[in-house]
Amino acid sequence: MNYYDVVVAGGGHAGIEAALATSRMGLKTAMVTLKKETIGKMSCNPAIGGLAKGHLVREIDALGGEMGKIIDATGIHFKILNQSKGPAVWSPRAQADRLAYMHDAQHRIFTQENLDVIAGSVTGVESENGAVKAAQLSDGRIIPCRSIILTCGTFLNGCIHVGLNNMASGRAGEEAAKGLTENLIDLGFKTGRLKTGTPPRIHIDSIDFDLVEAQLPDDPPVPFSFQSGPIERRQMNCYITYTNQKTHEALLSGIDRSPMYSGIITGVGPRYCPSIEDKVVRFADKDRHQIFLEPEGFDNPEVYVNGFSTSLPADIQEKAIRTVDALRNAEILRLGYAVEYDFFPSYQINATLETKLVENLYFAGQICGTSGYEEAAAQGLMAGINAGLKQQGRAPLILDRSEAYIGVLIDDLINKTILEPYRMFTSRAEFRLLLRHDNADLRLMKKGFAVGLIPEVAYQSMLARKAETETLNKRIAKTVITPAQFNPLAEEKETSGISQNTPLTKLVKRPEITLRELLNCAPDFQDEHVDPNTVAEVEFTNKYAGFLDRQQALVDKFKEMEKTVIPDNLDYQNIASMSAESREKLTQIRPRNLGQAARISGVRQSDVTILMVYIEKGRRSGKGDVSRETG
């Protein structure tokens, strides 16, 4: 068998990013996947992005990942969400042509240099002296390698449930991955069980479109990738409809055959995305629930019934869905189902996504307890980058919470107790004013270029945009608007005029006035084209300057906490003044610095103070070993 630098187990979104990253960094890589023809398959909703998830995709792109490019090439309905709120929480989302997305992803994998694709299943990790030695396959093959990245999705001992029937499967029609969980347990890893679900798919011709609300795509579509040109692909509408009381009655009539309510399913599911039967039980006061009808492609008759996730029996699914007025003739092409699978609690990985127990073994995606394509892809990319950097003898790439949503994601995984599938939200990012989707290139592309995943032309384009932004900021800081220039606009916008010359930077703070409109008022800018992305960046930094300054002050405080390094050899069990729970959690996680220690679930703030004093005492005493508490 050939020797590889990296073996990536899995061909989903995490596996794609990991394999492309390592191979492009010059490492000989093998992707091992059950079926080559299902690489890039969208198991659940054929959509990329969404609230906070769109931020992740743009950050993946800025670091040199592939997800943004694939959706730009195959998207059929692009939308910027949350535009009624502030720009910090705007987020791109796109519905994909499911088959086109999969085929585009496969083309990128199959044509990539340094990357081989092997059909099979990784069932074991061989180690020597605590480090990866080889990957074991289910058919007995051994692949010698230096690093392994496990991106197994929902396949680890996966079990699909429809009503009281269940079968071993990681995805409808595909085998479960068996043996790997048991191998990792033998190596000392702790495991758990999670659950997720998917709704039925119906035939597009069985929908009564006179009874639904059309959702139009943005025109023009906004690309995800900073390297994509304009999106000229034809777009499709999505649609909204609602359940009703008859729907709820039909669902409840089969609750005794629900695998979730009958106790057959033991894995914990996501609170934020409950099944339709769970919604009906938990929110009994609601007389209807929203359903999104999302086409899966121009030449694909399947429509994804978003909001109707269920694992109820087939007869109940058919009965319930046909009580919806627009779906009274619905033809179900694929039933909804729930899937249970093994995961490995994420306190067992470091910030690089390398495991603590086995050197050069990395976890990425749902194996860490996350849900979602975007969260998986972000982890796959970071695991691939860090595996590559380590083999090259270079420093790891670790993003902190003030730099990226990816930093928030990984920091949460290694510090918080994951009891249910983790999903990214904008509310998880305390510095979200600074972490907008539109400035991901300005924040992260330098890092992507440094690791070798961003081409020179894209990097230079980002530097030019950055320079243009700085130049425009300086110019508008010197620009003054006269009453004669501004007041016609004020009258049009039904806002108060001005009686004297006023700095443009003051007028742009008015919520009803845009920077573009003010530039049109200023003679120096009237005949000049300024890139819309540059205008948007400058407008935000000026309109929200006070908020940004306050958030930057918090970042500076955060950075100070991160500078207080905790010695690797510190024995928390000997800090008697600290609570037992804090000692246990700190011993389990082994935080790198005081800031990370403060974010660990179960660690009290008072104990963080004790730890800070303890570290300072050790430093003042000049002792490198602070493993014992000093009076």
Image (tube, grey):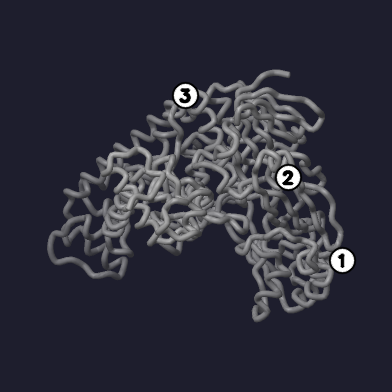
Extreme-front residue of the structure: 631
Q: How crowded is the residue under tag 2: few (<14 C-alpha within 10 Å), some, or many (20+)?
A: many
In the rendered structure, the answer to whether residue 590 lies left or right of residue 77 reads left
Residue annotated with mark 3: 393
Query: Which labelled disc corresponds to residue 620?
Result: none
Q: Earlier in the sequence, mark 2 or mark 1?
A: 2
Where residue 579 sits: x, y (%)? 45, 60
Whether residues under marks 2 and 1 lie with C-beta atoms below 8 angstroms apart, the answer is no
- Quadrant location of residue 120? top right
- Left or right placement of residue 488 versus residue 54 in this view: left
Instruction: Tell me what residue is drawn at x 62 percent, y 55 percent.
Output: 421
Give the residue displayed 27% in from the left and 68% down from the top: 491
Which three-letter amino acid code belongs to the residue tagged 1?
A: Asp
Judge whether residue 403 can be spotted in this image.
no
Q: Given the current orientation, which residue lies at the most extreme bottom position?
A: 285
Residues tagged 3 and 1 counted as in contact (Cβ below 8 A): no
Which sits in the foreground, 592 or 432? 592
Q: Quick check: marks 3 and 2 in contact, CB under 8 Å?
A: no
What's the mark number on residue 315?
1
**Badge 3 local density, few (<14 within 10 Å), some, or many (20+)?**
few
Query: In the structure shown, which secondary structural element does the residue marked by tag 3 occupy?
Result: loop
For the residues marked 3 and 1, what is the alpha-carbon distance in whole angstroms? 58 Å
Which of the 4 image quadrants contains residue 89? Answer: bottom left
Which quadrant holds the N terminus? top right
Instruction: Specify whether residue 177 is in view.
Output: yes
Viewer-proximal residue, 429 or 309?
429
**Image spot of residue 149 (x, y percent):** 62, 34
For label 1, the SS is helix
Q: Which residue is mark 2?
A: 156
Q: Amino acid at mark 3?
A: Gly
Q: Residue furthest top?
A: 2
